[in-house]
Image: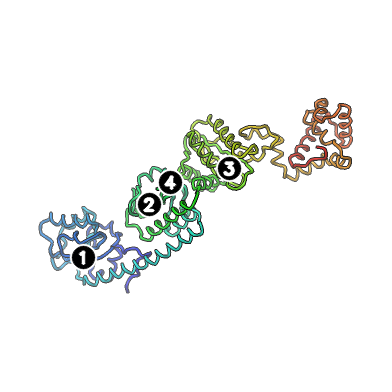
């Protein structure tokens, strides 16, 4: 029974060839190069020549009886050097014709060059070996051609429907079963699909490791970790690289993996050529959301991913910044691009991206903690220039580790949400700027507060509704003036006598003593809740 063709159309390995019945009959025994038995066999070549390299191209498994081998050990070493230099897969020597035992000099030479050497104790028909292995190779290559068409169809379909770069990277990883990374030319990891693996062992110290793996002219294992790397282009030439982190170091790459990586790199290049692609912003946005929503498995994973994108996590103070705006469409994305460029020009390291509709997130990494205020003011000025006076910039407390950035981000988000047009005007806000009016604005949807305000002020509102009155504005002026009646009368635009009458009516309707500090505070909270809900009485 013949073995099935190798999976995915790859070339059979020496190990797989040695397991074929036509060779097991010869009782094969490995004498050298046992660690290289996973080499791919691209062809089988039978030769009795002493200069076989002239007829080899690399990847051949050489069969010989050893008939022409000289007795001079140095010439045996030359013979093995030729095989090693041309890249032959290995050497099989059949005993019985020239040798009863493979010469020790030949074994030593193969061990020195790590060339697999196999002896056959019994004779086999070389023609049967070549026919069987060549049929296996041709069947496998036919399968590879068919699989290649399938792969081409997959990426063509993705390209035609405008698939995102994330989807292209994900598809590449799924088809190969290996982690895939998309990096730019500065070795920042913009996107990656790790197939459930943690980030830390895969992308830690990425820039250093990536620089050790050059882009080869032909897809082949590169660098100390044996990565497969395909270049990605844009309108200006080389833009980045698509990296397949195959776990099989320094071995013949799987031909299917090569096909997938080539097609994926072409699809990514076409996506970049198709129009503006804010891939860096997409990468920043993805990491920012993962940090905010605590999606990373561990602090080590979060640090590794942020550092792989170019944000230093150690030795820096980290600040979460939230920009709240009301613009629609792509204006937010354009702003985050401009903010990122402005920060880069001043040497500030940051991640910047639109994290939600009406929200832009900025994660600052500052070597000097005291430098955060000028940077925050610069962001505030940019936001106002681009998005108008309604833009609000809020900064969360600084932290020393990414494990604490989610809480800082939540505080920045709550601060941005609390600021109203009535708040003091500043370039940026911090949690300490959230006072009672802002706090009540955040809590305005709480039904308990709504019921409280209604209980406190319903009689006053109903009186104004029936009589087109102005008691609620009069009370608001009194509370704003902290009980100073003269000042309150001016704020209300009334004479003192008319204003005092209003206050007397308010006390009677509400059953309250406006001279009481506690009761005045209770009413003030109720008015602020009413204002936060956007409810206005007639005449206000």
Give the Cα separation between the discs numbered 3 and 2: 34 Å
Give the Cα separation between the discs numbered 3 and 4: 23 Å
Residue 388 position, x and y percent, is 63, 38
Q: Is residue 534 above or below residue 107?
A: above
Residue 239 position, x and y percent, is 42, 47
Q: Crowding at label 3, few (<14), some or many (≥20) Cα neighbours within 10 Å?
A: many
Among numbered discs 2 and 1, the one appearing first in the sequence? 1
Residue that mark 4 sits on: 184
- Is there CB contact under 8 Å for labels 2 and 1? no
At x 46%, y 62%, the residue is 154
Among numbered discs 3 and 1, the one appearing first in the sequence? 1
Inspect this view and state whether residue 434 appears.
yes
The kind of secondary structure element at disc 2 is: strand
Inspect this view and state whether residue 394 appears.
no
At x 25%, y 62%, the residue is 60
Q: Is residue 214 above or below residue 161?
A: above
Residue that mark 1 sits on: 63
Image-based side of 392 in relation to 41, left or right = right
Among numbered discs 1 and 4, the one appearing first in the sequence? 1
Front residue (pair 437, 241)? 241
Judge depth for marks 2 and 1 and give the one in front: 2
**The label number, if any, that marks residue 360 in the structure image:** 3
């Amino acid at each position: 029974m013949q073995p099935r063709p190798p999976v995915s159309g790859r070339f059979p390995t020496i190990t797989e060839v040695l397991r074929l019945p036509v060779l097991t009959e010869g009782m094969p025994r490995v004498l050298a190069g046992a660690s290289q038995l996973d080499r791919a066999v691209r062809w089988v070549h039978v030769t009795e020549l002493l200069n076989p390299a002239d007829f080899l191209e690399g990847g051949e498994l050489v069969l010989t009886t050893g008939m022409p081998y000289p007795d001079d050990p140095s010439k045996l070493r030359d013979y093995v050097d030729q095989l090693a230099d041309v890249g032959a897969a290995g050497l099989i020597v059949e005993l019985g014709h020239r040798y009863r035992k493979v010469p020790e000099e030949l074994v030593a030479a193969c061990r020195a060059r790590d060339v697999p050497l196999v002896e056959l104790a019994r004779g086999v028909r070389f023609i049967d070996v070549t026919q069987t292995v060549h049929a296996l190779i041709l069947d496998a290559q036919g399968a590879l051609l068919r699989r290649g068409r399938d792969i081409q169809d997959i990426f063509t379909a993705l390209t035609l429907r405008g698939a995102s770069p994330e989807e292209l990277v994900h598809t590449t990883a799924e088809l190969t079963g290996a982690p895939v990374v998309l990096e730019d030319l500065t070795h920042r990891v913009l996107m990656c699909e790790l197939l459930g693996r943690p980030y830390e062992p895969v992308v830690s110290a990425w820039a250093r490791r990536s620089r050790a793996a050059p882009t080869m002219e032909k897809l082949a294992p590169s660098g100390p970790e044996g990565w497969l790397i395909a270049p990605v282009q844009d309108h200006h030439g080389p833009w980045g690289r698509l990296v397949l982190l195959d776990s099989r170091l320094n071995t013949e790459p799987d031909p299917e993996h090569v096909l997938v990586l080539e097609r994926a790199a072409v699809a990514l290049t076409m996506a970049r050529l198709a129009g503006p692609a804010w891939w860096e912003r997409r990468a920043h946005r993805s990491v920012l959301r993962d940090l905010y929503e605590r999606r990373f498995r561990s602090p080590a994973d979060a640090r590794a991913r942020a550092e792989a994108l170019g944000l230093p996590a150690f030795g820096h103070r980290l600040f979460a910044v939230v920009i709240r705006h009301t613009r629609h469409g792509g204006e937010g994305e354009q702003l985050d691009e401009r903010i990122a460029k402005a920060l880069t020009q001043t040497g500030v390291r940051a991640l910047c991206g639109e994290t939600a509709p009406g929200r832009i997130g900025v994660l600052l990494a500052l070597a000097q903690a005291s430098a955060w205020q000028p940077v925050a003011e610069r962001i505030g000025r940019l936001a106002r220039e681009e998005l108008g006076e309604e833009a609000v910039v809020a900064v969360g407390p600084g932290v020393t580790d990414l494990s604490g950035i989610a809480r800082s981000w939540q505080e920045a988000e709550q601060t941005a949400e609390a600021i109203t047009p009535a708040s003091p005007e500043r370039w940026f806000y911090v949690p300490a700027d959230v006072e009672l009016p802002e706090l009540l604005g955040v809590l305005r949807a709480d039904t308990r507060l709504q019921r409280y305000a209604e209980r406190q002020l319903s009689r006053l509102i109903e009186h104004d509704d029936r009589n087109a009155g102005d008691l609620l504005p009069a009370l608001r002026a009194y509370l704003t003036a902290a009980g100073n009646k003269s000042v309150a009368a001016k704020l209300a635009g009334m004479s003192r006598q008319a204003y005092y009458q209003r206050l007397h009516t308010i006390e009677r309707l509400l059953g309250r003593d406006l001279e009481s500090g506690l009761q005045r505070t209770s009413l003030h909270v109720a008015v602020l809740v009413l204002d936060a809900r956007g409810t206005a009485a007639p005449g206000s």
